[in-house]
Amino acid sequence: MLDLKFIREHAGAVKEAIRVKGVNLDLDELLGLDRELLAVKQRVEAMQTERNANARLVPRATPEERAALIQKGKDLAEELRALEPALRAHEEQLRQLLLRVPNIPHPDVPVGRDDTDNVELRREGTLPEFAFTPLDHVDLLEQQGWSDPERVARVSGSRSYLLKGEAALLEMAVQMYALDVLAQRGFTPLSTTALVRPETLVHSGHFPGDEDSVYKLEGDELMLAGTAEVPVNSLYAGEQLGLEQLPVTFAAISGAFRREAGSAGRDVRGLIRVHEFRKVEQYVICRADEAEALGWFETILGNAEHLLRGLELPYRVVQNCTGDMGAGKVLMYDIETWVPSENLYRETHSCSYLGDWQARRTGLRYRGEDGRLVYAHTLNNTGIATPRILVPLLENHQQPDGTVRVPGALRPYLGGRASLGRPVR
């Protein structure tokens, strides 16, 4: 959410953000509603002033005048009550439009329509060269008896998964590795629920817009979040933090649930796109200082890259264009990790800076050095998401005999094992 005063004074910049981000919103409609609401409020204030002035006359009035003044007061009160529904309706309509106003992208963000217009910034790591015919992750899992896709599909339907034996241990090892690294870097580990109230998805910016992607629990007024960002972003909703409490840095792990309603037919096979997964999410609340926030952006981006280097995975960093960064983002980078079976990089991390866009929705403020209350800035980035990261991990580290090499960073979490699986060829 943007400040309404800012929108009024910078309507041109906001309209451009709406255009380049592809948001379906008529800003002139919003501004027109804003003017109407101001007119209604001015009328209400004028009538309240008149009613108060009328009330002050009653004690000094003659009996004949008093009756007329009392009746006038009743008439004014009735008119004010009649205006209340219109006032509330205008306020709610304006609020709904304000929730759809996108953030202003950073000047460095490339303008584009979708992910095909994203800009590659750099590549890290060496692509594997196999002296044998490599398998994709689905065949690797089945060959080792680490999955049971037919049975789990009978239990849970499509886009479900099951990991057995060493693959299950590998998934947990990756999660613990990510949490340990982030904790060593000063982030507070946090284990949180994915069950959230609907307003938390408004706070995070997923609503309005992504309603079809979210699972709803009928009869309970609860929903299943697709990332720990959602519950963590609302932890301090409506609160006023002290300057000494900032920055807040969390490494939050939770279940994550996504309906994938817009992904029909895409990545149905395997672990890339599943309905339920586990994710370690980096989340930062900092002062309303862009330079400081951009410093945190580099920090959480660097943390994710450090994790991938520890997993010995080749990856690239891309800058998201305006049409692929989401309404609330000021700046967004994706990290894409190499998947040999597809001969391409697949997105595994998304690093985002949102300015005060989320904090305005949650009502999260802090008291600055001058004593004024200021909306905080927020950032987030994936730490590790499983099972998706297992796709490049298994495929890049497969060995000629069918086993999978364990990167050194993961060995302490797997009892010192240097490889997983049994030789099959």
Image: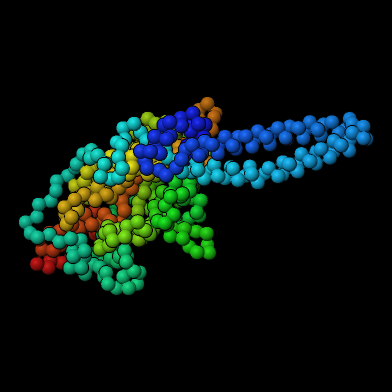
Image location (x, y in percent) of residue 108: 31, 32
* Foreground of the two, 190 or 69: 69
Image location (x, y in percent) of residue 162: 30, 66
Please state if 202 lies on the left or on the right of 307 as rendered: right
* Foreground of the two, 172 or 30: 30
Q: Residue at x 35, y 54 (%)?
A: 279
Please state if 293 lies on the left or on the right of 162 as rendered: right
Does 220 sit above or below residue 410? below
Q: Residue at x 34, y 45 (%)?
A: 381
Please state if 237 lies on the left or on the right of 260 as rendered: right
Looking at this view, name the residue that lies furthest to the top.
370
Q: Residue at x 51, y 39 (%)?
A: 30
Q: Quadrant of residue 52?
A: top right
Here the colouring is rainbow
- Quadrant in which the C terminus is drawn: bottom left
Looking at this view, name the residue that lies furthest to the right.
63
Image location (x, y in percent) of residue 18: 40, 39
* Foreground of the two, 180 or 212: 212
Q: Quadrant of residue 84?
A: top right
Image location (x, y in percent) of residue 27: 47, 38
Q: Residue at x 13, y 63 (%)?
A: 402
Does 368 sit above or below residue 276? above
Does 176 sit above or below residue 375? below
Residue 330 in view, yes or no: no
